[in-house]
Amino acid sequence: MPRLRQVPREEVTDPLVQSVYTSLFGDRDPVAHPGTEMGTPGHWWTVLALTPHILEHFVLCSRMYLGPKMHLDAQLRELGQLRAGWLNGCQFVYSQHCKMGRNAGLTEEQVQAVKEWPVATCFDPCQQAVLAYADCLISQRGRVPDGIFARLKSFLSDEEIVELTYITCSYDGYAVLTRALRLEFDDRDDPVVEVAATERYDGADFMGRPR
């Protein structure tokens, strides 16, 4: 279960939360009867409903980057979001944006190759520049070498780079939030744990030498 309490439908008084619940869950109580059409449990919504003002901020941000004022191509936007989910080990963000990426026009080969893009041959030079920039935003926490930034600027306008940076960094944050609160597909135990030794283990090191 998520680490925080979920808000059942009977407790909802905020109009935005009511609208979100109806849009995603119909007449169901999403806590008692979870599940969305995209195959997720719906924890993201029922936990953020604890703070309607934060849920509203997320909804407005999503509407913004899907809206008509954006300069950035949708496929490039999705590459940044996909890479953010993959690098953070966030299955929820990664899985959702596999679907969104296809809807934006990415091929199945491209969607699957995002996790190994440096050796993939299915991305054009602009897409490669976007993925390299996303790697710097997420893995290097914004330390972007001049060469990578110059390459990005050879393809995108200043306005497009602002949008790409803002959206990719936003989804970096969403991925961290999802894992920290154990929401959606990230409601799982950490897989990096000690595996018990056999009864024959005598304290020798990994080469079998006595300690």
Image (spheres, rainbow, N blue to C red):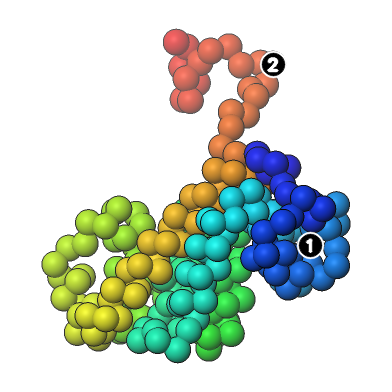
What amino acid is found at the position of numbered circle 2 in the picture? Glu
Along the viewing direction, whichever of 90 and 60 lies nearer the viewer: 60
SS at mark 2? loop
Quarter-of-image position of residue 75: bottom left
Q: Is residue 96 left or right of residue 6?
A: left
Between marks 1 and 2, how big is the CA–CA gap? 44 Å
Which quadrant of the figure contains the N terminus?
A: top right
Quarter-of-image position of residue 70: bottom left
Along the viewing direction, whichever of 187 and 6 lies nearer the viewer: 6
In the rendering, at what x and y percent does residue 50 appear? 64, 48
Q: Relative to 95, say whether 178 is above or below.
A: above
Residue 121 visible to the viewer: no
Residue assigned mark 2: 199
In the rendering, at what x and y percent does residue 103 appear? 59, 85
In the rendering, at what x and y percent does residue 49 appear? 65, 54
* Residue at the extreme left of the image, as rendered: 146
Between disc 1 and disc 2, whose residue precedes?
1
What amino acid is found at the position of numbered circle 1 in the picture? Gly
SS at mark 1? loop
Along the viewing direction, whichever of 112 and 134 lies nearer the viewer: 134
Residue assigned mark 1: 35
Which quadrant of the figure contains the C terminus?
A: top left
Find residue 166 and name its label.
none
Q: Is residue 162 left or right of residue 35?
A: left
What residue appears at the point 34 percent right and 54 percent down from the top-left corner? 139
Q: Is residue 144 left or right of residue 124?
A: left
Residue 125 visible to the viewer: yes
In the rendering, at what x and y percent does residue 54 appear? 53, 56
Q: Residues within 10 Å of mark 2 (few under 14, many from 20)?
A: few
